[in-house]
Amino acid sequence: MDTDVVIVGAGIVGLASAYKLAEAGRSVLLVDRKGFAEETSRGNAGAFAFSDILPLATKDMWRKLPRWLADPLGPLTVRPEYLPQIMPWLVRFWRAGWPDRVDAAIRAQGALMRVARTEMDSLVVSAGIGSMVRSDGVLELYESEGELRRSWHEIDAKTREGIEVRVVRGEVLAALQPGLDPRFVVGTFVPKWQTVSDPYDFALAIGKAATDRGVTFRKAEVKALRPLGDGAFIDFADGTSLKAGKVVVASGAWSRALTAPLGDLIPLDTERGYNTTLPPGAFDLRRQLVFPGHGFVVTPLSNGVRIGGAVELGGLSLPPNFKRSEAMLKKAAMFMPGLKTAGGRQWMGFRPSLPDSLPVIGRSRPSPHILYAFGHGHLGLTQSAGTGKLIAELVTGAAPSLDLAPFSPQRF
């Protein structure tokens, strides 16, 4: 073999997997066409969302959907030209919202989140990057008591999983975040929620910690994978190839191009997320804020205030529609009077999403030596270290930290 383990994709999941494999004593080569964290991991909302255990396709989402879809700049939209291509995914998404599927997804996501929290805590300590993590909690804001009641099933599901959620009003709400528009009369506060100082810097720090432990990097585009009896061939765009004992596909939204030719027809698609990062001092932001009725979040970062979120189903090829960023920024200015909206930087990223909101973590159909670690949707940063631990267990033959059946690449 030319190398022991090759990870295709140097986003946050690939970087954390490389770190965990190096920690387990394996020799690792990271391959990416651009570099460390140059795609989706560069500009996300920067949260460890360990309490986000509900799938996207919940009853509350379906109630909001008609209103959201009626607004082309709203929290969820489908680009008309992409509708024929996304339709099979949408059918699976609809099925994922049935009560039996939702309950199973919550249990699976809860189990993965417990591993993810433990492994992220371990990674942060061992890599010496604790100063990059903030533990300020998150505040979800509602415009009426009725809106809160309609979200109570989500709060109840989190409580059953042992997640602390506090309902806050009046002076308590105002103290958690001064300067909000008075339309927000009630909120929920999750005190153990964490954010990072900047997701790109955090990913680079993990990459440096991994390379300090012997992980190597090659800038190259992978065109195809070919199973080999005791490993796999990797074919590169420049015409070269190498043999590896194990290959991990962690290419996020671009993973399907490598997995479909292997016979694993995984319904991976892309949620395009938009944001604007305002300069430092744009608002006295005490912690991350979530506006669930409007589908966006506001995050305090070391380099400013990031306002973003929402979902646009439009694939990988269509040009960005930055009017979506502008619409969120306009709402944020209404919700946070005094927000300074000048000087912002716009960004769009591709979330690798599966209809049931669970990632793919497991072995490929044709070969036990080709493994998958993608499809984390909004939760790539959150679940990166946990996924890395599970991949390291699969590579080394250790007993898995949880039942991987709900995350099987063959579940579809």
Image (cartoon, grey):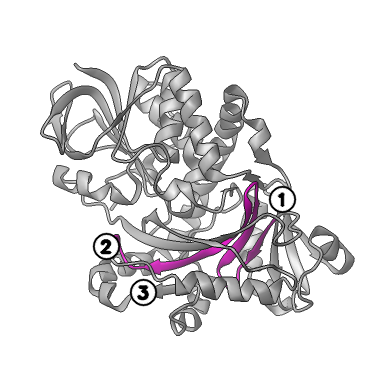
Quadrant for residue 353, please give it: bottom left
Q: In percent of the image, x 76 and y 75: which residue is there?
A: 181
Q: What residue type is labelled 3?
A: Val
Q: In percent of the image, x 61 and y 50: which residue is there?
A: 51
> Which comes before the other along the chain, label 2 or label 1?
1
Say whether residue 119 is left or right of residue 152.
left
Mark 2 or mark 3: which is in front? 2
Q: In percent of the image, x 62 and y 67: which residue is there?
A: 342
Is residue 318 shown to the viewer in this render?
yes
Say which of 84 and 211 sits in front.
Answer: 211
Distance from disc 3 to disc 1, alpha carbons, whole Å, reads 32 Å
The overriding secondary structure of the stretch rendered in magenta is: strand
Q: Position of residue 123 (x, y in %)?
A: 56, 28
Quadrant for residue 334, please give it: bottom right
| Relative to 177, residue 337 above or below | below
Distance from disc 2 to disc 1, alpha carbons, whole Å, reads 36 Å
User: Residue extending furthest left?
Assistant: 239
Picture disc at residue 78: 3
Mark 2 or mark 1: which is in front? 2
Picture disc at residue 317: 2
Q: What stretch is highlighted in magenta?
A: 288-316
Say whether residue 398 is left or right of residue 336.
left
For label 2, the crowd category at 10 Å Cα-Cα, with few meaning under 14, some 14 to 19 and many 20 or more, is few
